[in-house]
Image (cartoon, coloured by chain):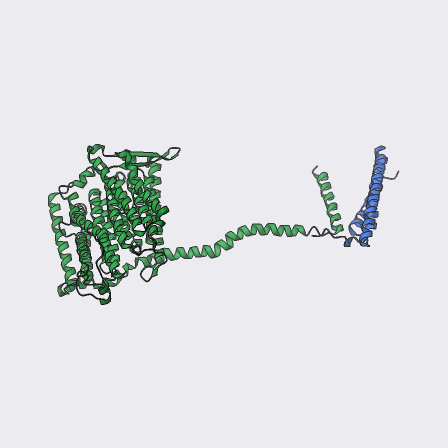
Amino acid sequence: MFESVWLLFALPAFGALIILFAGQWMSQKVVGWVASAAVAAAFLMSVLLFFSLTALPAEERSITITWWQWMTIGDFHVPAAVLIDPLSVTMAMVVTGVGALIHIYSIGYMDHEPRYQRFFFYLNFFILAMLTLVMSNNFLGMFVGWEGVGLASFLLIGFWFDKKDEMYGWYADCGKKAFIVNRIGDFGMILAMIMVWSTLGTVVFTELNEAAHHLAPATATIICLLLLLGATGKSAQIPLYVWLPDAMAGPTPVSALIHAATMVTAGVYMIIRTNMLWHLTTDAGLVTAWIGMLTALLAASIAIVQTDLKKILAYSTVSQLGFMIAAAGLAAYGAALFHLVTHAFFKALLFLAAGSVMHATHGILDINRLGGLRAKMPTTYRTFLIGAAALAGIPLMSGFFSKDAILVVELEKNIALYLVGAVTALLTAIYSFRAVFVTFHGQPRDQHVYDHVHESPGVMTIPLWILAVLSVVAGVINLPFVLTLDRWLEPVIGEHEKIPLVLELLGITISIVIAVLGVLIARSLYLTNEPWARRLTQPFSSLRKPAEQKWYVDEAYTFIVVSPIKAASGWFARVFDPRVIDGAVNSVGGVLSDAGEAVRKLQNGAIPAYALSIFLGVVVVMIYFIFAG
Amino acid sequence: MVPTSYYLILSAIIFTIGAVGVLGRRNALIIIMCVEMMLNSVNLTLIAFAMQWNNLNGQVFVFMVMAVAAAEVAVGLAILIAHFHLSKTTNIDDINLMKW
């Protein structure tokens, strides 16, 4: 059974190739269904792998299928191999499952897109790269996938590269920003990989499990901090989160798939996968946890004042990723993966529902121009509501259990982190329901937009309902005290810590209070306009302006990093390159040319001159023979 | 006996006059004559040393030099006359076809 894991990769690969070479003769629907079928088949494959794993006893749930030796340079061996274990199979199921739903949704969403062939090719390529990332058994294979999803992200964000508007600028620039910011993270990854190999002699994950014990704590800390840098790039944390809001320039299915459900979770996955290194260093874990929570708080504070629906969801994604990264930093890998899975469901749902709104309003997502849409788009409204409830952590939704799992770990380990988490959870609840109330409830703010709104076709709403159901029930995979997912992951992450009952119950209670309070505040601020909420938020009103300007982070980066680099590059391009480099090359030619000009003057055709030169030559030879010969 | 150095000095003077003439004169014919002068000065040197060392090799070599001088004059004058037919001038400053 496990030998046929190559099919998991071959299906999206063949899908991509078929679309690449034969897509021009196929209609948009056919191309879409071919792509979706490829990913759906890959999902079935991953489910089969899952069931095959469950048939094995827990200690044996780690199978390596080696296809060939990729690199052998002296002692450096890197196989092209796949690691089938609980973690990789879970990720594969999420990636292909959510991916298939989004592919199907895209058939409806991109129905008027003339460049559909390119779009579905890129989507299938992304699935292939993401599977490489999560199933590879060594750092380098994972890095190939890492770079591949970065490339797919760049291509898809800038899909409409010839488009330009006020909010995003050139859409192509948004793709560039994502790629370049990611590259800084990749720099950290590469250094970490080099350090791992040079200190431990291997890059294969299963071998690292034993070898990691040889690491000195200081070395492990440096390696993990470098890995953290990579994670902050891919998973949009401080300081490298700035690309994700701009990534909303891409088509909404892309935002759902790549920038909510799958690619951005690669950082979290990577930390869980390399947990054998993180176990050696609590310092790096603490840094990670703080970066995660601070990012969560920062992003939530920006989300609460955004007016574009996709931007709200984008900052929300950054914020929720912060929770996951923090959990990974505190070694609560089960909780991190749990939130990863539930977040994939409800965030993809929210984005697809936002896409449904966008499809209906022909691109308008400014919530100040929407309102009252629930009457005309009931399915979109209901599914969006379910997603928002999951995001806010309404009890019994999947998001409630997964976010609570993380908060409880913070409550146990670090009270300061817990307080940040609690505040962020409150903000999360507020902005989620702000989006719901302003977009779907109340009176339409722009009558013209409202008149043209219609519900989306079935090919778009059925994935919405499937994701909605998943957002509700997915909590069962890791209920408190039952902890199915934690036990499932034990072969990969080791024994999970048991949280004391008191803390668990305290955490659950506070989470319920926060979620309900958040919904009530949002309702009174944005729906019913009650004064008590206004009084409650009055102290924070001075923070509104900076929050609307995203805390000036982009401006700061432009000032500190981008402008100096552009100035330096400009200097290099205008001064250094033409004058110094071209000058050096040209002057070599110039020197030779001038020398030739000078020597040429010797040949003046005047016979006395030639006679003189003969004469001088004789003199020189004579001097030589008299004095040295 | 006349000291050998007198012959050598004389020979040097004649050689220098000939050299200066080769380098400085304009008329091709005069230049050829100066070349002859340089060759003759060398002859004088050879004879002087032959006398000093009582060795006849020097004097025999003078004959070689003379033979070469004669052949060279023949060729040189032939070139000069051929060029004169072409350009109607013996001024070497006008012979500059090989100029860059």
Q: Position of residue A164 (x, y in %)?
A: 35, 60
Relative placement, left or right, of A577 versus A466 is right
The residue lying toward the viewer, choosing from B85 and A218, is B85
The residue lying toward the viewer, choosing from A95 and A415, is A95
Q: Quadrant of residue A115?
A: bottom left
Q: Position of residue A259 (x, y in %)?
A: 28, 51
Q: Which color was chain B given?
A: blue
Relative placement, left or right, of A273 versus A560 is left
| Image: A69 above or below A584 | above
At 12% from the left edge and 52% from the top edge, which residue is drawn? A512
Q: Total of numbered circles in the picture? A: 0
Q: Position of residue A395 (x, y in %)?
A: 13, 51
Query: Quadrant of the image for the N terminus of chain B?
Result: top right
Note the chain letter of the green one: A
Q: Position of residue A314 (x, y in %)?
A: 26, 55
Q: Residue furthest right?
A: B1
The residue lying toward the viewer, choosing from A525 and A622, is A525
At 58% from the left edge and 52% from the top edge, which residue is drawn? A590
Query: Can residue A99 be seen in this snapshot?
Result: yes
Query: Can residue A347 be seen in this snapshot?
Result: no
At 67% from the left edge and 51% from the top edge, which residue is drawn? A600
